[in-house]
Amino acid sequence: MLPKQTNNTLFFTGNHLSRPSIARRGKGFSRAAWNELESEVPGECSVLKIGSHVSFSEKGLLSAAQEAISYGATTFMIYTGAPQNTRRKPMEEQYVPEGLALMKEHGIDEIVVHAPYIINLASHKTDTFRLAVEFLQSEIQRTAYLGVENLVLHPGAFTEKDLYYGIRRIAEGLDEVLSAAKNVNIALETMAGKGTEIGRTFEELAAIIEKTSFNDRLRVCLDTCHVHDAGYDIVNDFDGVVEQFDRIIGLDRLTVIHINDSKNPRGARKDRHAPIGSGYIGFDAIYRIVHHEVAAGKPIILETPWIGKEEATKRPMYEAEIALLSDNADKRFGPAFREDVAKLRAFLRDVCGEEAGVGGNGREYVLAAWAVLHDKKQRSADKREPMERLYDLVIEHDLFPGYTEEQINMRLIGYFAGL
Ligand code: FE
Ligand code: FE
Ligand code: ZN
C-alpha cells in the first residue's frame, strides 16, 4: 500500500538536480497576426498587462474583447464556454477575426484561456479521466485556434485516492495530452487546497512537472487568493514566496498571475475570492505583487466577484480595480472620483471613528468585520460582508444621492486602495 499524502519528500525530493527547467522560448507566437500585434505596440513593457475574466458567450472573442476594453484592460481571460460544462460551440462561430482586429486596435497582444473546472485529470474513475483527457485535447485545439499561448488548468482532485496517486494520474493525463500539443502551454494553477485538491504546495506542482515526460510545455499560474489560502505569506513576505517558487518550481515556469483578494485568513484552504482590498490580502499586498519584477510583462488576471445587493444588480469592480492597481484612476474616472473617495474617507472616519480604523483605507475595519464573520455566533446575527456594511452606511446617510450601487461600490474600492 502506498503511504499517505502528508510527506511530500516521498515523491518529490526538493531542490535536487532534476528540478525540470525549461529553455526560454521568448514570446513565441507562431501566428502572423500575433507577431504583427507585438511589433505595433510601442513600449508595451511599461504598461501593466492587466485585465479580468470576461464572457465569451454572445459573440465569442469579439464580445470578450469589447468587455475587456470597457474595463480599460490590456489583457483578459476567457473560458471557451461555460466553466462548469463541456458544451462548446465551434470556434468558427466565435467571431475570432473580428475579436483579434479589435484587440489589435487596442494594443491587446496576449490573452489567456482557462480550462473548465470539470476536468479532473487526477480522477481514478476511468470515465472521468477519459473525459478530462479528451476534453483537454479539444480545449488545446480551441486555444491554438485563438493563437493563445497559455491554457490555465486546475491540476485535479484525488477524491477517494491519495495525493501520490493523484499526482501520478495527472502526469499520465498530461503526457497523453501534451504528446500531441504543438503550440499551447498548460499552466497549472496553484490551488487553495480545499478538499482533495492537488497543487496547494509548490512541491506538489513541481512533482507533477517532474513526473510528466513532455513537461517542456508545462507552466504555472499563480493565484494570489489560492496561495494565501494555501498558507503562503504573500502579504508580509512575497519575496520569500517568490524565492520558494523559484527554488522548487523555477520562475521560468511562471506565466500567468491571477489576482484576487481572499475572504479567509491565510492557510484557511477555502478558495473564496473577494474584490481587491476587501479581503484578508489587502490592496497594498496585491499592488506590490502586480508591480513586482516577476509579474512584469505577464498577464495579470482579476477573478474577483461581482458586487451588488441583489443578483440582478451585481456588477464587476474590474474597471476600478484595474485603474487603481495601474495608478490610472484619475485619468480613467476624472478628478471627481478622487474627491468622492476623499468624501467617503472623511464620512467613514466620522461615522465609525478613528478607533474603528476606517480613517485611512479601512484596513482594520475590513479585518475586524471578517473576524466577526468567522465567528459562528456573531455571524448569525449579521451576515453582511465588510464591503456591504460600508455600502449600507453610505446609503443610510445618503452620502452620494443619485449614485448607482455600482458607482458607490467602485468608490469603496478606491477607498480600500487608499486613493
Ligand atoms: Fe482557476
Ligand atoms: Fe484563479
Ligand atoms: Zn479560486
Image (cartoon, rainbow, N blue to C red):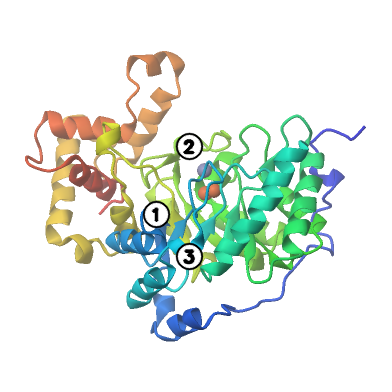
Image coords of residue 241 (percent x, y) = 60, 54
Query: Disc 2 versus disc 1: distance between alpha carbons?
Result: 19 Å
Q: Mark 2 sits on what residue?
A: 272
- Disc on the earlier residue, 3 or 2: 3
Asked if ligand 2 lies within 8 A of label 1, the reply is no
Give the residue type that dot 2 points to: Arg
User: For residue 136, what is the image quadrant?
Assistant: bottom right
SS label for mark 3: helix
Asked if ligand 1 lies within 8 A of label 3, the reply is no
| Label of residue 54 in the image | 1
Q: Nearer the viewer, mark 3 or mark 2?
A: 3
Query: Disc 3 versus disc 2: distance between alpha carbons?
Result: 35 Å
The image quadrant where one finds the C terminus is bottom left
Residue in the picture at 93% in, 32% down = 1
Q: Are marks 2 and 1 in contact (CB under 8 Å)?
A: no
Q: Is residue 290 visible?
A: no
The correct choice, above or below, for 3 with respect to 295 in the image is above
Q: Are marks 1 and 3 in contact (CB under 8 Å)?
A: no
Give the residue type that dot 1 points to: Val
Q: Report the side of 81 relative to 269 (left or right).
A: left
Image coords of residue 213 (percent x, y) = 82, 62
Q: Mark 3 sits on what residue?
A: 92
Residue nearest the observer in this picture, 281 or 115: 115
- Disc on the earlier residue, 2 or 1: 1
Q: Are marks 3 and 2 in contact (CB under 8 Å)?
A: no
- Disc on the earlier residue, 1 or 3: 1
Image coords of residue 290 (percent x, y) = 45, 61
The residue positioned farthest toward the left in the image shown: 401
Asked if ligand 3 lies within 8 A of label 2, the reply is yes
Residue in the picture at 31% in, 51% down = 417
Query: Disc 1 versus disc 3: distance between alpha carbons?
Result: 19 Å
